[in-house]
Image: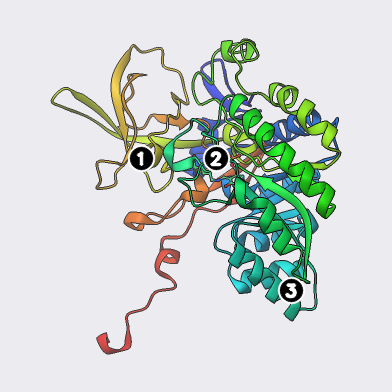
Amino acid sequence: MHDFRFVGNQLFCEGVSLASLAKKFGTPLYVYSQHTLTDHYQKLAAALAPVDHLVCYAMKSNSNLSVLRVLADLGSGFDIVSAGELQRVLAAGGDPAKCVFAGVGKTAAEIEFALRAGVYCFNVESEPELQRINRVAAKLKKIAPIAVRVNPNIEAHTHAKITTGTYENKFGIAFEDIAGVYARAAKLKNLRLRGVQMHIGSQITETTPFELAVKKVLPLVEKLKAKHGLEFFSVGGGLGIVYHSMLASGVPAWWQSAAAKNILTPASYAARLLPWLQPLGLKILMEPGRFISGNAGALVTRVEYVKRTGKKNFVIVDAAMNDLIRPAFYDAYHEIVPLIRNGKATLKSDVVGPICESGDYFCKDRPLPKVGEGDTLALLSAGAYGAVMGSNYNARPLPPEILVNGKKFAVARERQAVEKIWSDEKVVAWLK
Ligand code: LLP
């Protein structure tokens, strides 16, 4: 569930009207609900309560310092993929000892930084990486905790660009090779074999692929535990969220019928997985990103022009693919609603940004209430992989981010000053 809803004709995030935020801070603008972040984290933690567990929020989905602090205060760990992300955790007051370091391309410098910071574990994606971590740890006279990422070769039935658990992908080590890799890793003196990890993809909306992957990997995990005395099994992230009908009144139908349709909720996820995981007797780690941050955010934008050409009605807004790239990149659906309901009839529209690319659109031929210049719109479920994937394409400053908590709100990121975009550039000497 989430905390964006209409009160009368006005769209609110918790106790704050989005129109008032748009007026105060301008557009485009990201708005996050602290309550949704908290609620989603707590729902997952509660679902995993029967087992010893650690939720490591995949901060790649939204790494704003305030978002990280909300989660750190709840006791969350973090799934990090770069030294930069670890530095963000530290800057936000998170605990490095609850961080798992993932990614196929960790540099020696990043490994050294993470080892000095004392991360919980490195999720290792290749044998050369094991060798490198061992070398860096030896140099620092440290023992590096590691888990190998198993690629279970399970089809997750999600978008091709975000599926990771098959042999077509660059991720992890093939299921069949894992036992040999652990045997060789056990001989490396500066490694501690702490766990096993897997992750099959993102935006997976059914429990079945997770269950199939866990069932497949489980006997291997049991063997590795017996042989190498492991401490944890990480089932990765990837829990999908709802992008459609977010503002249906009352309890949305999808939520009511979720269990019946095998749709993923924390409870249905736990009900399907815990019977397999509990007997293992290992600590269970999870790396959810989108599930925690996705529905917690909206991108607010203003209509600049409405233009009809040929058969099309184009609503040209001041946000663009540089602010939210998901529709352009993954054909992703984000629900779009006016901040103030106007009761006007709907009209099939393309909502597009000002960037000079045909890919710069948020929806195509979607029935939307008729809007005009100056009206404001919200793109919902933009809390995950929204602001973090933003760029300065077309010399567009990054939008501000506002955190809402009840009736309170505060700037969690200032609107970028336009000069900052080129502040690291120079006109080279011979051109002066
Ligand atoms: N663990 C690993 C190893 C991952 O690669 C990922 C995401 C996660 C956890 C968190 O996945 P989540 O729970 O958020 O699904 N930009 C894309 C999604 C990329 C996901 C990359 N890996 C999008 O906007 O859909």
Q: Which residue is mark 1?
A: 328
Report the amino acid beneath label 2.
Asn
* Residue positioned 78% across, 58% down in the render: 193
| Residue placed most toward the observer, 321 or 102 | 102
Please report whichever mark, 2 or 3, sits nearer to the chain's N-terminal start: 3
Distance from mark 3 CB to nearest ligand 1 atom below 8 Å = no
**Numbered label attached to residue 153:** 2
Q: Amino acid at mark 3?
A: Ala
Q: Which amino acid, mark 1?
A: Ala
Q: Position of residue 141 (x, y in %)?
A: 80, 78
Q: Earlier in the sequence, mark 1 or mark 2?
A: 2
Instruction: Tell me if I can see residue 228 in this picture.
Output: yes
Quarter of the image with the N terminus is: top right
| Secondary structure of the residue carrying numbered label 1 | helix
Residue 233 vs 377, above or below: the answer is below
Disc 3 versus disc 1: nearer the observer? 3
Position of residue 42 measured from the top left corner of the image (x, y, whole percent): 77, 32
Do the residues bearing badges 2 and 3 touch, measured as CB atoms within 8 Å? no
Circle 3 — which element? helix
